[in-house]
Image: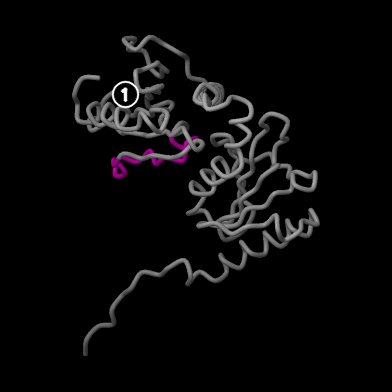
Amino acid sequence: MPLATSLPISSDDLVPAREEILAQVAKLSAHFRLPAQFIRRFDGGFSLEPTAIGKCWEAPELSEQHHLVTVSPVGDYGTHIVASERLGDNPPGAYLAVCGWADVARACEYIRVEFLNSILMHLHGRDTLPHHVLSALHNLKIQRRPANDTRLPSCSEMQFGTLLRLDQHTLTKACNYFNFSPLPEDAQLGSTALDENVCAARALSSEDDVELARIALFYNWKASAAHRDLKRWQKGGSR
């Protein structure tokens, strides 16, 4: 008698998790008395705009800081709320995303690009990279150093943008902050949007040495140069 074929489950099979996300959206909608036009579905969850009616969401104390957003677990089945941080005149929690644990990185990127991008452009024009760098350095406690300084961790200005060099003490925190995996098996170059014009990319070292990873922050039009630099370093070449 042939054995039954084993197939992986899909997210559609996880009914309690999907229902928990919808329940959390309904709960927030009722709490804010938020009209339906300020609730949207995106590829990974739902977004809400309490700021549209002059309200905001207060993140719990156990929230985790990511780039320009906070992430809070809120349920028994992996539901998370991603909330925008204070930016300009907009208070924390002005924009929200509700998603499952596997879609947190996508939700963080969605909030930054869909909602915070226009605020950043209003504050800084198209020159938003310095704001991203300052925010990252503040949260990660990384110092600026010359490009030829071997001390770690460090932040250096490069031709393509800004480069963060990480050691064992900063690897996990920095990767989590930008929603990158710090695991060696995820060695493929990772990338995420910080706004419409700025990206971050991460490379893990191919060798077990002191400098374990690099994260580059750059404008989209310098992506090729940034990726080339990261891949060259990852393969053990010179900077």
The residue at which mark 1 appears reads as 211
Q: Which residues are magenta?
A: 175-188
Residue 213 drawn at (x, y percent)? 34, 29
**Residue 52 appears left or right of 73:** right
Q: Is residue 63 above or below residue 33?
A: above
Residue 47 lies in the magenta-colored region: no
Q: Quadrant of residue 91?
A: top right
Residue 64 drawn at (x, y percent)? 58, 39
Q: Nearer the viewer, residue 29 or 23?
A: 29
Residue 95 drawn at (x, y percent)? 66, 45
Q: Residue at x 31, y 44 (%)?
A: 186
Q: Amino acid at mark 1?
A: Glu
Looking at the rendered structure, the secondary structure element under dot 1 is loop
Most extreme residue toward the bottom is: 1
Q: Is residue 56 above or below residue 199?
A: below
The number of numbered discs placed on residues in the rendered structure image is 1
**Quadrant location of the N terminus?**
bottom left
Q: Is residue 167 above or below residue 71?
A: above
Q: Nearer the viewer, residue 24 or 119?
A: 119
The colour mode here is one colour
Q: Residue at x 46, y 40 (%)?
A: 179
Q: Quadrant of residue 118?
A: top right
Residue 181 lies in the magenta-colored region: yes
**Residue 227 appears left or right of 9:** left
Q: Is residue 82 above or below residue 121?
A: below
Q: Nearer the viewer, residue 165 or 184?
A: 165
Q: Nearer the viewer, residue 119 or 28?
A: 119
**Quadrant location of the C terminus?**
top left
Q: Residue at x 54, y 34 (%)?
A: 67
Q: Residue at x 67, y 59 (%)?
A: 24
Mark 1 crowd level (few <14, some 14–19, many ≥20, 10 Å Cα): some
